[in-house]
Image (tube, coloured by chain):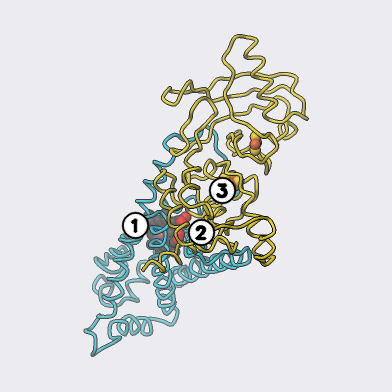
Chain colours: A cyan, B yellow
Amino acid sequence: MSSSIGLKWLMAVTGIVFLLYVLLHMYGNLKVLAGQEAFDTYAHHLREIGEPMLPYGGLLWIVRIVLIASIIGHVYAAFTLWSRSSSARPQGYAVKKSISSSLASRTMRWGGITLLLFVIFHLIHFTLVKPNFNSEADAAAVKESPYVMVSASFSLIWVVLIYTLAMIALGMHIYHGAWSASQTLGLTSTPRARTVAKTTAQVLAALIVVGFLIPPFYLYFSSL
Amino acid sequence: MRLTLKIWRQDGPDATGGFETYTVDDISEDMSFLEMLDELNENLQARGIEPVAFDSDCREGICGTCGLMISGLAHGPEVTTTCQLHMRSFSDGEEITIEPWRAHAFPVIRDLVVDRSAFDRIIQAGGFISVDTGAAPDAAATPVPKVQADRSFDTATCIGCGACVAACPNASAMLFLGAKVTHLGELPQGQAERNSRVVDMVAQHDHEGFGGCTNIGECAASCPKEIPLDVISQLNKDLRVAARARR
Ligand code: HEM
Ligand code: SF4
Ligand code: FES
């Protein structure tokens, strides 16, 4: 497990956990398009899944624990491998060209850190603190209704911009990550399987970027 | 052709090195890159300067000793070894930077020569078959399906040059490992040790201080023998199977 391939395994498996979560999250966000009532009911309903077997919000907590464990594993593996890679080449080249690698593949580490910072901002923004950036919105309503909270924020162009940049970073991470994970898990041992994995990664990345950006842009333009 | 060469000079393993700039004149387009360096060394010797140390042996692309980083590209701009690279791939007046492979596991011995014995130790850890394969006629008694035979042969063309490590931003040797594991793993004779081979070779790889793979693909793009990336997937798969068999 501590071998370089074992750590890649950890990164691939936790990465796939994120990927599944991100797909579900994106689907949920799209409910904004159905209006305030549908979205607020959905947010409330999420907390009731599994009742009475689970307490109110129980499933959400299970998901959160899995995600927290995954992020710890993912980041631990990323930084361990990062440090091994730096010591594997103590002296760099004076001149070094890249022939075939994609920008996405070369920015996995810094892009990943960007994503982590964004995740922290995002949690503060919509889960933990729910600050009201919009002076025109009613602060109490922002705390009450998820729909009001989200639409108050996304009527501000700079918030839309932060989310857009973050989603591009996410798309790049997934574009390389999904293909890389299939390679790490040993699923791409033929040229054909490799093409399929690369195409799937592209489609997934595009789907996630577009899917996540529809609600903010929809809310921004309807607020004009 | 007239060329400016910026070459890494280093007196010994522990010496601090640096770049020296030399110019060479009257270089023919038909010369190989190593012949161009031979020409430079003759000039240097005539002027009483220590010639540039570089490695070469077969000079026909099969031994794997001649690797150089040429203006940021392992083995230079063509898909071939440094010894098979010709000066027509460069233009008159060009400045060429020549560096040794850079990796913790490939320490510089002198100038452009690095110690690649880490690869030998990886092979010693598991890159072999110890079953008795018999004499030549016995080969016919063990049929190998065409698809497997082809894949085994294609990956057996790896000459252990280390360009994959040199080009990889992580200085990872996974393409080399993948080539060896696939070459032996596709053959019936390779099955007996298949699980221990991959486990031991990966352990030795990490022990030598090569980095982990991030599936970036610079290795396959730099490999003079065009070993494809799917051997790394094969390697990961074999390791997964071996890890499961151990439990
Ligand atoms: C601090 C935060 C993060 C860091 C430092 C980070 C870093 C990395 C690195 C270095 C890789 C390996 C890339 C490669 O093999 O080329 C990777 C893979 C991956 N990451 Fe992240 N990442 C982070 C957060 C995330 C997040 C939030 C997601 C959620 C979508 C994610 C999803 C993935 C996936 C699916 C993979 C593929 C696994 C593989 O390469 O085998 N990562 N990450
Ligand atoms: S895989 Fe290619 S680049 Fe790497 S050692 Fe073998 S021949 Fe050289
Ligand atoms: S000298 Fe043998 S491969 Fe170049």
- Mark 1: few, some, or many residues within 10 Å (few <14, many ≥20)? some
Would you place residue A183 above or below residue B121 in this image?
below
Q: Secondary structure at mark 1?
A: helix
Look at the image and tell me whether residue A215 can be seen: yes
Residue that carries the numbered disc 3 in the rendered image: B219
Question: In this rendering, do the residues under marks 3 and 1 share a single chain?
Answer: no
Q: Secondary structure at mark 3?
A: helix
Would you place residue A124 above or below residue A32 in this image?
above
Nearest-to-viewer mark from 3 and 1: 3
Q: State if disc 1 and disc 3 touch (CB < 8 Å).
A: no
From the viewer's side, name the closer residue of B127 and B243. Answer: B127
Image mark 3: chain = B
Residue that carries the numbered disc 1 in the rendered image: A75
Image coordinates for residue B221, horizontal then vertical, percent: 61, 48
Amino acid type indicated by mark 1: Val
Which residue lies at the image location 40% right of the left edge and 78% below the top edge? Answer: A28
Question: Residue A190 lies in what quarter of the image?
Answer: bottom right
Look at the image and tell me whether residue A164 can be seen: no
Query: In the displayed image of the protein, which residue is found farthest to the left?
Result: A55
Which residue lies at the image location 38% right of the left edge and 57% below the top edge? Answer: A7
Q: Is mark 3 within 8 Å of ligand 2?
A: yes
Would you place residue A219 above or below residue A108 in this image?
below
Image coordinates for residue B196, horizontal then vertical, percent: 44, 59
Nearest-to-viewer mark from 3 and 2: 2
Nearest-to-viewer mark from 1 and 2: 2
Residue that carries the numbered disc 2 in the rendered image: B235
- Mark 3: few, some, or many residues within 10 Å (few <14, many ≥20)? many
Q: Which mark is residue B117?
A: none
Q: Quadrant of the C terminus of chain A?
A: bottom left
Amino acid type indicated by mark 2: Leu
Q: Is mark 1 within 8 Å of ligand 1?
A: yes
